[in-house]
């Protein structure tokens, strides 16, 4: 019976670890997205930091990435920055992959 309990604890620990990694990677992705978007919007460092904060807040509106996508779409539209939906989504995917690598590398 202890073997079963050990296995169950191991599975729970892996799940917790994976969820922690996902949370950190998403947070890192949002920071990278903010920096990317700030560059396209021509923002200075202070405004870029504010944009990152607003992206992070937007990500807490609902599960998934649609809230972040809608936020970016609205910002680009408001400032008349040409970005197609698929370009935004593609960048979100690329930056998530980069964020995962950074988090796993400990940087």
Image: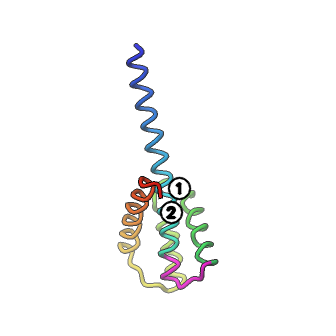
The Cα–Cα distance between marks 2 and 1, rounded to whole angstroms, is: 6 Å
Residue plotted at (50% across, 61% down): 28
Whole-percent x, y for residue 101 in the image: 39, 58
Q: Nearer the viewer, residue 39 or 103?
A: 103
Mark 2–mark 1 contact, CB under 8 Å?
A: yes
Segment colored magenta: 37-45
Please tell me whether mark 2 sits on a helix, a strand or a loop: helix
47 left or right, relative to 35? right
Whole-percent x, y for residue 81 in the image: 47, 84
Looking at the image, residue 73 lies above or below residue 43? above
Residue plotted at (48% across, 82% down): 40
Residue plotted at (53% across, 77% down): 75
> Alpha-carbon neighbours of circle 2 within 10 Å: few (<14), some, or many (≥20)?
some
Q: Which mark is residue 62?
A: 1
Whole-percent x, y for residue 16 in the image: 48, 39
Q: Is residue 42 magenta?
A: yes
Q: Which residue position holds label 2?
A: 67
Q: Quadrant of the N terminus?
A: top left
Q: Is residue 84 magenta?
A: no
């Amino acid at each position: 019976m202890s073997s079963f309990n050990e296995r169950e604890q191991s599975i729970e620990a892996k799940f917790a670890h994976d969820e922690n990694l996902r949370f950190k990677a998403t947070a890192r992705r949002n920071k990278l997205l903010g920096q990317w978007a700030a560059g396209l919007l021509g923002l200075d460092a202070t405004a870029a930091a504010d944009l990152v904060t607003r992206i992070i807040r937007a990500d807490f509106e609902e599960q998934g990435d649609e809230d972040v996508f809608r936020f970016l779409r609205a910002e680009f539209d408001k400032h008349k920055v040409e970005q197609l939906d698929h370009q935004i989504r593609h960048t979100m995917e690329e930056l998530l992959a980069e964020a995962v690598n950074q988090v796993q590398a400990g940087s």
